[in-house]
Amino acid sequence: MDQARPVQLGNKVVGSRVSFNLDGFRDRKSYREEIGRVLASHQARLLTLVGRRGIGKSALAARVLAGLEKDVWPHTDERLPVAGLAYISVRRDGFSLETIYFNCTRLFTADTAARLRTYWSHLPGTIEKLQRLFDEMAGAVYIVLLDNLEDVLTDEGRPASTDLSEFLDALFRSDAHPRVLVTSRIPLRLESGLQRNNLIMSLDDGLPTDEAVEFMRELDPNATLGIRDASEQKLAAAAEKLHGVPRAMELVVGALEHDYLTLPSFDELVNNFAERPDIVAGLVHDQHETLNDDETLVLMTLSARRRPTSTETVEWTLKPFAPHLDVPPVLSALARRHLVSFDRRERVWELHPLDSDLLDARLRGDPELHNKVHRRIAEWHSARQVKPSEWTSPEDLNAHRREFDHRIRAGDLSEGTSILARVWQFLVWHGSVRSVSQMVDDLGPIAARERVVLPAAAFVRLIEGPESECIALLEPLRAELEVEESREAAQALMALGDVYRRMYRLAEAAVVLRVAATKFGRLGDVRWRFHTLLVLGLAHASGGEVAEAGDISETIGSELELNNDESLGRLHDLREMVAIAGEQWAEAYEHGASAAAHYERAGVLEALGYVYNGMGLARLGEGAFDDAIYWFTRGSQEGGIAIGDSRIEGLCLLNLACAHLSERDYDAAAVAAGSARRAFAVYGSEEAELAELALNASIAGSSGDDRAVRQHVQTLVRSRPPNVDLYPAQVLETNCLAK
């Protein structure tokens, strides 16, 4: 067994167990021992438990992990310390990288968790955020359970969500990683090169006959149903017909518990359902058909909530439209029939996934009741929201997002719009763009029509792409946005101006951004005016309008109170770009060094690559090629590869190739240009064509074809777009064409 380092812990266990009543769990000793052996290995990355409905996948996983909570492993008496364990139910919690990330941050000390929250806010890519999280797990045993993963798989078992694909990518590529245990009805299918990392344990059979017999006897503890005292032969025959499926046995006993006098006998029930293709589904369906109105209403409420729920919460939810319903005895009766599970430790009730699916469909069949229930649950979440003044991370907005989800389910789109308008800016600023994107999608066309959420829709497209969709959304509205005096109009114009800048439509960008900045000034919105002026300054610098860009930087420095490292870093970042545009190389280098120092103190890691790239350009302009090569290399590695920003990686590598070309080190130039081309291809950037030209020049140089080198470099110089982040054309002309 591998040894794990001791760690200073936050919470050892986060999340709720995915299966309750583990005291009644049947042995399955060989399965538990094999799970223990796999999870104890430091090489373990992913173990998937696969089996039909009701076979006991979640219970098996929960039983093993309950022991690991106490460092008790099923396959050995040796104590291997478990540093942290996260229970995540895909059915209950959904699947998102944000959910996994923030649940896991709670496994660490407060200082480490705070650092991880900073990474989430500032790192641009989700895979990079996960890699930082996984790095904190190095040398220790951390286990993540993903229960009911089939909810985010296609029928063929392929990942059906980008978040799942990216999670698996990070899990398989990282040296440090958690050990992930999955339960699913559908086997997870990966690309052939990755499938070896996915160990699959199939629960093809139910409980062994002797364990199944014992299990059924325990379901009739008072011998009121004729099961506890039945003969071994009779119960063994029943177990065989029910394939030893624990859930099927529970439901048969539950059916007898419901009405022992009038229902068919135990033998008749077993024989009836054993003939059906899906025993568990048939039993659940028939049980639901016998529910009375009160029982149905309580179960529908639990189903709508989609998470463990206390008795008091069920009562509160039903009070407006069932004021006289006595909830506790109804829940107790449902528990005796094995239609709900009760967690005595947390004092909450939960449904089995199959029951939840059937009840969801039944609730949707009564639109009026459906909307009432979801509206009431939305109100419950609304009452538990954190005040904006206390928001520190996206976790603090979970109640807002749950209210939003239930408002949408209730058809309250106006309420959903209002919630998105309140939360989108904080979520975007703190790294949860994908969450905002999902909310925009959930609202549908209203997100483009309603002015209060138009900026949310715009910034999602600006950040995640494609940029053409941002243009298509905002350009038809430009004229009316320019005359409208509102924060939303100014924000939308800022997004439009920034996408113009990125597409090198610099004159249009300057006009739109200046209008937006003026609006923010009249509104007294200092933060948005600051960021708009920064983008405006970059647009002028990229267009070679050095004086205008310098004026913008002076305006920022004199007009705005900059009292934190991030703001000061961004100001020096802009001044670095202005100096580069004006070919003031020494000044550019000084501003770059200042920007880097401020960014490092503020933890704004995503900006460092651009600053290092600018410092490399400054040294390249001075002819200090060795220094330039150092900064371009550092920018590509620390600002690009390390955080997964393929665009800045590509820019640094392309500039590095140009530095090597200037020194006529063609082999090194070819390596850098080829890597730049690959990075730009990942990002989908047009600069890939420039990398191709640099690569062709490098190959020609390596073969001694000076004429071809000059042709490719001339094309590289002519093709350079107005982008201040790219190689100075005159440097290539001086060093490659004039020699």
Image (cartoon, rainbow, N blue to C red):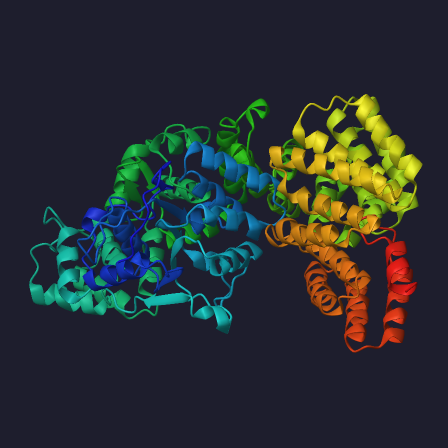
Residue 65, relative to residue 492: is it above or below? below
Residue 707 x %, y %: 89, 75
Left or right of residue 384, residue 6 in this image: left
Q: Which percent across, then down, holds residue 521? A: 82, 24
**Snapshot quadrant of residue 556:** top right
Residue 630 visible at all: yes
State which quarter of the image contains the N terminus. bottom left
Query: Against 595, is 501 above or below?
Result: below
Viewer-closest of 592 and 132: 592
Q: Quadrant of the C terminus?
A: bottom right
- For the point 32% across and 54% down, the residue is 58
Return the x and y of residue 402 as percentages of the image width and height: 52, 38
Q: Is residue 477 visible?
A: no
Q: Is residue 136 left or right of residue 271?
A: right
Q: How many marks?
A: 0
User: Left or right: 382 with respect to 285?
Assistant: right
Between 579 and 285, the one lying in front of the other is 579
Q: Residue at x 82, y 68 (%)?
A: 693
Q: Nearer the viewer, residue 345 or 195?
A: 195
Q: Report the side of 168 relative to 737 (left or right).
A: left
Q: Point out residue 88 in the picture as x, y percentages from the top left corner.
A: 41, 47
Seen in the picture, residue 596 relative to 100 is either above or below; the reply is above
Image-quadrant location for residue 239: bottom left
